[in-house]
Amino acid sequence: WIQFAAAKGVRRLEFNFSDEYVIHPRCQTRHLSEAERCYTSPTPITELMKLGRDLKQLASLRLHSVGLADEHVPCFLHNCPQLEELSIVHAPSLSDVKVVAAKVGHALRLKHLEISECKGLQHLEVVASF
């Protein structure tokens, strides 16, 4: 379905795998750790990375409770030149995120950046010109 969305030139893509939308059978039997409450299957992010420039029309990417690595954020910015909104909520595996316009390879159009509930985040670097 990600490939279908890319083929249609979607401008907004949202993945929300929080417990509010996904009921895990194991949720009823024990408390889940931060990492367990994230969708960690590589499928959505792997598919996004494979599509690369096929997402060139994407203006908004919202990720909630999706397992991400630090290197995914600059990858999204590089592969999505029209990206104006990037929202990352509850990604505990993020620790050192860099949003550096000079390393993107094109003018950064980002107007809204949200990184919240990422308890493992220790360093956030944002470098952009206006």
Image: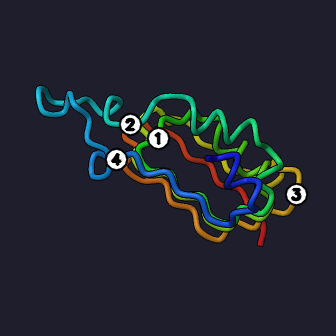
User: Which residue is the site of mark 2?
Assistant: 38
Q: Amino acid at mark 4?
A: Ser
The first of marks 2 and 1 along the sequence is: 2
The first of marks 4 and 3 along the sequence is: 4
Instruction: Confirm or deny contact between disc 2 and disc 1 (CB under 8 A).
Output: yes
Element on which disc 4 rests:
loop
Q: Nearer the viewer, residue 16 or 87?
A: 16
What's the distance in space between the residues labelled 1 and 3, CA to CA?
Answer: 26 Å
Tell me, what colour scheme is on the image?
rainbow
> Of the numbered discs in the image, which one, if any, rests on residue 66?
1
Q: Residue 1: x, y in percent? A: 61, 47
User: Which residue is the site of mark 4?
Assistant: 18
Which residue is located at x 65 percent, y 54 percent? 126
Instruction: Confirm or deny contact between disc 2 and disc 3 (CB under 8 A).
Output: no
Instruction: Confirm or deny contact between disc 4 and disc 1 (CB under 8 A).
Output: no
What's the distance in space between the residues labelled 4 and 1, CA to CA?
Answer: 8 Å
Q: Residues within 10 Å of mark 4 (few under 14, many from 20)?
A: some
Q: Nearer the viewer, mark 4 or mark 3?
A: 4
